[in-house]
Amino acid sequence: MAENGNPFENLAENVKEYVEVRVRLIMLNIQEKLTDILASIALFLIVGLLATLIFVFGSLGVALLLGKWLGSYFAGFFILAAFYAIVLMLVWYNAGKWIKMPIINFLLRKINNSDNN
């Protein structure tokens, strides 16, 4: 940058450099937030997969145990299916506050997080 040129040219050059730096900073902030959100989603998917496996095998075990106690394996599976149907209705009825709002709040916290940690 030439210091002995026209002051307006120097000002224009400084403004141009400032705008370029600001655009670069905004792009880096967007990249940081996006990678943080994607890493959180990946972690959620991995934990969700493992929790699903635990849930499925645990449910099979409970159904077989109930069936053994009742003398009919079909009864154990039907009792467990009825229990899950009740849980499904509760979750469906409260989906907004139990599922939707926590996800929205989580994503907004991730997007608006000014802390670098």
Image (cartoon, rainbow, N blue to C red):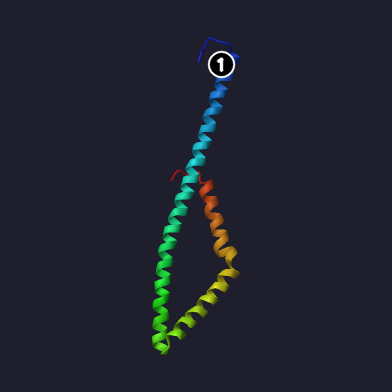
Q: Secondary structure at mark 1?
A: helix
According to the picture, the residue beneath numbered tag 1 turns out to be: 10
Between 88 and 13, the residue placed more toward the observer is 88
Between 47 and 25, the residue placed more toward the observer is 47
Residue at the image point whose x is 51% and y is 32% from the top: 24
Relative to residue 117, is residue 47 depicted above or below? below
The amino acid pointed to by label 1 is: Asn
- The total number of labels drawn is 1
Relative to residue 18, is residue 79 depicted above or below? below
Estimate the x, y position of residue 41 in percent, counting from the top left: 47, 54
Q: Does residue 108 appear to the left or right of 76 in the view shown?
A: right
Estimate the x, y position of residue 29 in percent, counting from the top left: 50, 39
Relative to residue 4, is residue 80 depicted above or below? below
Residue at the image point whose x is 52% and y is 54% from the top: 106
Estimate the x, y position of residue 37 in percent, counting from the top left: 49, 49
Residue at the image point whose x is 40% and y is 63% from the top: 50
